[in-house]
Image: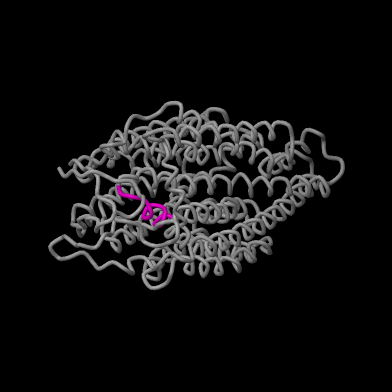
Amino acid sequence: MTSASETAPGPAPAGPAPAPVRRAAGPRQWLGLALLLLPVTLMTADLGVLWLATPYLTADLEPSSSELLWTTDMYGFMTAGFLVIMGTLGDRVGRRRLLMAGSAGVIAASLLAAYATSPGMLIAARAALGVAGAAVLPSTLALISHMFTDARQRATAIAMWVTALSAGIAIGPVVGGLLLDSFWWGSVFLLGVPVMLPVLVAAPLLLPEYRDPDAGRLDPASVLLFLLGILPVVYGIKRFAEYGAGAQQLVAFAVGTLGAVLFVRRQRGLTHPLLDLRLFANRAFTGALLTLLLGMMALNGVEYLVPQYLLVIGGLSPLAAGLWLLPGAAALILGSQLTPVLARRIRPAYVIIAGVLFTLPGFWMSAIAGSGDAGSRLASLGLALIMFGVAPISVLGTALAVGSAPPAKAGSAAATGQTAYDLGLALGIAGTGSVSVAVYRDELAAHAPAGIPAEAAEAARDTIGGATAAADSLPGGLGDELLVAAREAFTTGFHAGALVSAGLALAAVGVAVVLLRQVPAIGADAEPAAADGTDAEPAAASAPVLAENGNPAPPVAASAETR
């Protein structure tokens, strides 16, 4: 066991600061990384299978459009709400211990979701899965930041972490398609059981336990205020995107704003805050969070809609739709692996900007995709370009968020970065998805054939799945006319969502230019770790720890580890 005290970032000391010991990762660290990538892969695989399962669970459970959106984005909202809490809790109780507890929670919530008998039960299961996922994700990233102390090795490890997210996107639709072709829709949620069991068994053998020895006690009031600050705002955004301005939305924004103000005031007065607000004084940290948020919103808004487009407009089977999604996942994997190589020679901001330029043709292809095989090819290729271009945001945003914080704050920094990541994913679904739903409803109301019974018309306006079911119940050509109108309305909504997402990607470029352009290339000032496992250069992170002005901040000593 090694132990050293941590000093918070601040003014440079008068004399030279002692440099932390940096060791090259060995076989145990790389095997531990492989184990950590299992739950990371599961999280995005779960999203992929849910997207394909949506038409089937819609037909079985008959959720309303609001319930369907809550089913898809409840996981992301709860994860975003609890990530910072769980990340800070991991610094106190141990990151490996929290990882194992979260893994057990994922298994239980997956079983509950698989056998849900109502929309409310499924939404509750997704909420429980989000809380459990919030315990798992920051634990994996914080452990990686602790296990890999060499700057370039850490950048590679984080790129593999992002690649695992991409692999989940690739595996999820294919496995989900196979399951949906043979079993009921609930079977797709059972993926969490065989993935998380090895983590529970092997974590004590391969992963170090790590906690901040000076973290202090978790403040319950801070936890409540944080949830009060983030969840009502997210709810208000969702309601505003779906229904426009209203009293309910304004109250949600007001409650969230009040909760956020009270949370910030309390953190400033605590010796051991839930979230160290001094992290936000770092331009790289703040820029990384905003870039992650906007980039993930841009990606997930389209990524959520494409599977439904392939199933409903393209007329593909779940397995065929999953195969059409493979090019996008492969592009994200390629971009994730290429990013750290480029970032060693080029400033991260320029790599991010170049990536976004790749997304713009992809958004354009999505915005003009029509019906049939040609439309499916355009949507698939467009998504591939988008995912390739967003990869630098995923890798570098995460690396900069973790790398710009001192080692003892890695859990909090990783959790905050992951909050931006997952909140972006959730808001991408809620915002872009809700805009698409609004356009769908307006278009269907304008072009639906006359003579449809009121009950069937209401079901058709609710969701495209409801329109399909309503069309089957109508006589002769009337049902066919309704189905054609519904598909055209869905396509128009899909196009609108692609344009909204393109605007979000351009906003991410603006953030990178303003806040990240001074960040140097990753590892540019650091030498590789020595063969004997030590190195005198401070490299506490995959990117240099930067001060407010973008210059390297004073080095920070390592914190305690127990094995």
Q: Is residue 506 above or below residue 427?
A: below
Residue drawn at x 16%, y 60% as measured from the top left: 534
Q: Is residue 541 above or below residue 122?
A: below
Most foreground residue, 214 or 147: 214
Could you tell me which quadrant the N terminus lies in?
Answer: top left
Residues drawn in magenta: 398-407
Residue drawn at x 56%, y 28% as measured from the top left: 120
Give residue 471's position: percent from left, percent from top: 74, 42
In this rendering, position of residue 128 left or right of residue 152: right
Give residue 272's position: percent from left, percent from top: 36, 34
Q: Quadrant of residue 411?
A: top left
Could you tell me which quadrant the C terminus lies in?
Answer: top left
Residue drawn at x 62%, y 60% as measured from the top left: 502
Q: Quadrant of residue 269?
A: top left
Magenta span: predominant SS is: helix
Please say whether residue 392 is one of the residues in the magenta stretch.
Answer: no
Give residue 492's position: percent from left, percent from top: 72, 55
Give residue 448's position: percent from left, percent from top: 81, 46
In this rendering, position of residue 370 left or right of residue 31: right
| Residue occupying the far left of the picture | 532
Q: Quadrant of residue 500?
A: bottom right
| Residue occupying the far bottom of the picture | 345
Please say whether residue 404 is one of the residues in the magenta stretch.
Answer: yes
Residue drawn at x 66%, y 34% as measured from the top left: 64
